[in-house]
Image: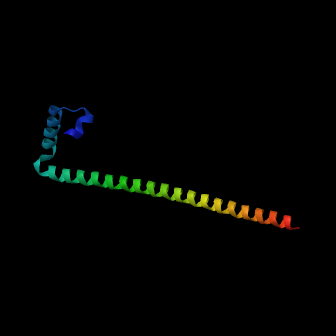
Amino acid sequence: MGNLLFLNLGTQEVVLIMFAVLLLFGGEKLPELARGLGKGIREFKDASDGVKREIHRNINELTANEELKREEEIERSKKTEVVVEETAKERKDF
């Protein structure tokens, strides 16, 4: 009943709804309906978990790519510094 608090339903309303469902579907169909509802909720949760995993995977992949680019830029700048230093030394030698 705690899950229904956000719907602002009281005990009397919930009992009335359950009674109406019992009258409409009968006692034999209720377990089947509950199973179907449970399967639907489970599938929805699984799908939403899959979407969350995919989003996190893509974020991690983007972050890893950005780190690789930064490392490559650092390596390039180090190589450029070495070349500049070697060129400066060669000019001094002449």
- Considering every residue shown, the one lying at the far front of the view is 93
Colour mode of the rendering? rainbow
Name which residue lies at 15% across and 33% down: 11
Q: Is residue 7 left or right of residue 92?
A: left
- Quarter of the figure with residue 14: top left
- Considering every residue shown, the one lying at the far right of the view is 94
Name which residue lies at 77% across and 62% down: 84
Q: Quadrant of the N terminus?
A: top left
Q: Nearer the viewer, residue 5 or 32?
A: 5
Q: Nearer the viewer, residue 54 or 18?
A: 54
In percent of width and height, residue 64 lies at 53, 59
Name which residue lies at 85% across and 67% down: 93
Q: Nearer the viewer, residue 80 or 61?
A: 80
- Quarter of the figure with residue 65: bottom right
In percent of width and height, residue 50 lies at 38, 57
Q: Nearer the viewer, residue 90 or 54?
A: 90
In percent of width and height, residue 8 lies at 24, 32
Q: Quadrant of the C terminus?
A: bottom right
Where is 63 relative to 94, above or below?
above
- Considering every residue shown, the one lying at the far left of the view is 27
Count of marks placed on residues: 0
- Quarter of the figure with residue 89: bottom right
Where is 89 relative to 18, above or below?
below
Q: Is residue 44 left or right of residue 27?
A: right
Q: Is residue 13 left or right of residue 41?
A: left
Name which residue lies at 36% across and 52% down: 48
